[in-house]
Image (cartoon, rainbow, N blue to C red):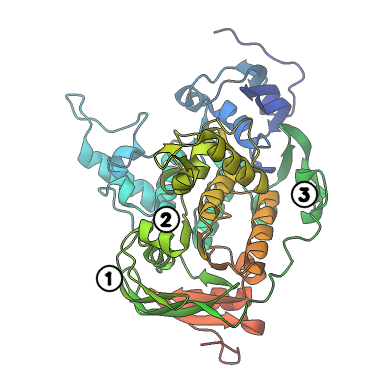
Amino acid sequence: MSHQVDPNAAGWDLQALDMHKSYGKVTALADATLKARYGEVHALLGENGAGKSTMCKIISGSVRPDEGRLLLGGEEIRTASVGEAMRHGIGTVFQELSLLPDLSVAENMFIGGGAPRMAAGLVDRRAARRRTQQIFDELGIADIDPRSPAGSLPLAQQQLVEIAKVISRKPKILILDEATSTLPRQDVLWLFDIVRRLRDEGTAVFLISHRLREAFELADRITVFRNGTDAKTGPIDEFTEDSLVEAMLGRELGGSLEQRPPEPTPEVRLEVRGLSAGTRFRDVSLDVHKGEIFGLAGLQGQGQTPLLQALYGWTRSSGEVVLDGKALDLRSPRQAIRAGIALVPEDRRTEGLALEMSIRDNLTLPTLRRHMSLKTLISPRREDAFAEHLARSLSVKAGSLEDDVSSLSGGNQQKVMLGKALSAGAKLLLFVDITRGVDVGTKAEIFALMRRLAGEGTSILFYSSDATELVSMCHRVAVMFDHTIATVLEGAALTERNIVQASVSGRVAATTEVAS
């Protein structure tokens, strides 16, 4: 392969120049440019679908551009595959996990090369497990057994394995595409320490994140993508949070993230008494009012997600659940849906969407009976009208509703998953970290939708790993500790400080008013 040196490349170690990429009628990149230096952390910000992940996939070799040039050290290179990019020193932790769930953690660590081998050329599994444990020890990763099937790990631990796998190969350019989106705060801080160390050793790090505070905590430089191109770039000290949001959206956000939801009614919608599910959670009791947004907080793994899954009939449990005065025996999601309960799960790709199906089919899947004519056949006209109404009301950005849902950006996939939950007209919505991996504009739209639904009388149980979201959006927040509800915060006691303190200790300061 011939290489071409660019005489204008001085001062930049990596340059992706004039990149174009389209998927059918959808333009992902249009004349986009990105540059980086070794020894810098470069944050890439923008709405979902703005082009930042596509740009990084081109650099990482997982996507080929329609046009554009990629230069490393002033020399033009081609990255036709992830393996070839790695040979150029480019390693990527992708937004969507790439682990093979049936293989062990150790086996996943050496997919793509580097596995220790025996004399006959076979993979030495014992040595692979020892090397994996050594890598985990060096990086400070605890409580992950290299022998465990990767698919048996919680989502956050799977993300840690992905990060360790890439970092262990010592890339000179590291791309973190929403690598913090599934991590609890303590693991985010761990990753930031690793990134700072790599930066100081001369690695160039690209950080894609929808959490603006992460950019200000970690980045030396920021590039904002909007509508498929680089809209603004510069050192971190040239930006404020307001100027970043304005650059990302091309408009002012108007303070919509700070608006409070309307007050709920005194009428109790959901009563939970003594609900338990083995070691996942125990003796949970709570009431949720009609029109209330009730938050769930706590460190990851304290039972928040299994609790919501139990209320959806997904996880078997014991105890009492009453909805609008009627006792429920929730043994399956079908029973929950019929009772008026809908769940938006944590992982949209494996739990929430049928990726091989169209956007329309995903939106109408829970309500197919509504779209039947002659009691047996689905009416395409009814189904299309219903899907178009849902997509329009949620501002889903797509070329066509016939497109596969997998073709959408993460934020638009999240909107389709919300549409599925709303399609059945649920009285109680269960949200599991629904703003994970979505941009500030989409988050504002989701919060506006939550406020509207609450105002119309829908009740929402909302688990979020972001204490700021819970404080701004919820009427009350239950903090889970040791797999049960430790305290419920409301009014003046509902603060980020109290949520964090209760999450790590199971209690708040004695002077704080706590609702029981």
- Please state which amino acid type lies under the numbered disc 1: Gly
Decide: few, some or many residues near mark 3? Use Cα within 10 Å; few <14, some 14-19, many ≥20: many
Q: How many marks?
A: 3
Give the image location of residue 1, x and y in percent: 54, 8
Q: Residue furthest front?
A: 374
Decide: few, some or many residues near mark 1? Use Cα within 10 Å; few <14, some 14-19, many ≥20: few
The residue identified by callout 3 is 244
Which of marks 2 and 3 precedes in the sequence?
2
Decide: few, some or many residues near mark 2? Use Cα within 10 Å; few <14, some 14-19, many ≥20: few
* Tag shown at residue 140: 2
Q: Cα distance, mark 3 to mark 2?
A: 33 Å
Left or right: where does residue 196 sit relative to residue 235? Answer: left
Is residue 76 shown to the viewer in this render? Answer: yes
- Please state which amino acid type lies under the numbered disc 2: Gly
Q: Residue furthest left?
A: 120
* Tag shown at residue 278: 1
Q: Nearer the viewer, mark 3 or mark 2?
A: 3
Left or right: where does residue 395 sit relative to residue 93? Answer: right
- Asked whether 483 or 259 is in front, the reply is 259
Q: Height in image: 292 above or below 27? A: below
- Asked whether 26 or 459 is in front, the reply is 459
Q: Residue at x 52, y 34 (%)?
A: 380
Helix, strand or loop at disc 1? Answer: loop
- Please state which amino acid type lies under the numbered disc 3: Leu
Helix, strand or loop at disc 3? Answer: helix
Give the image location of residue 346, x and y in percent: 47, 54
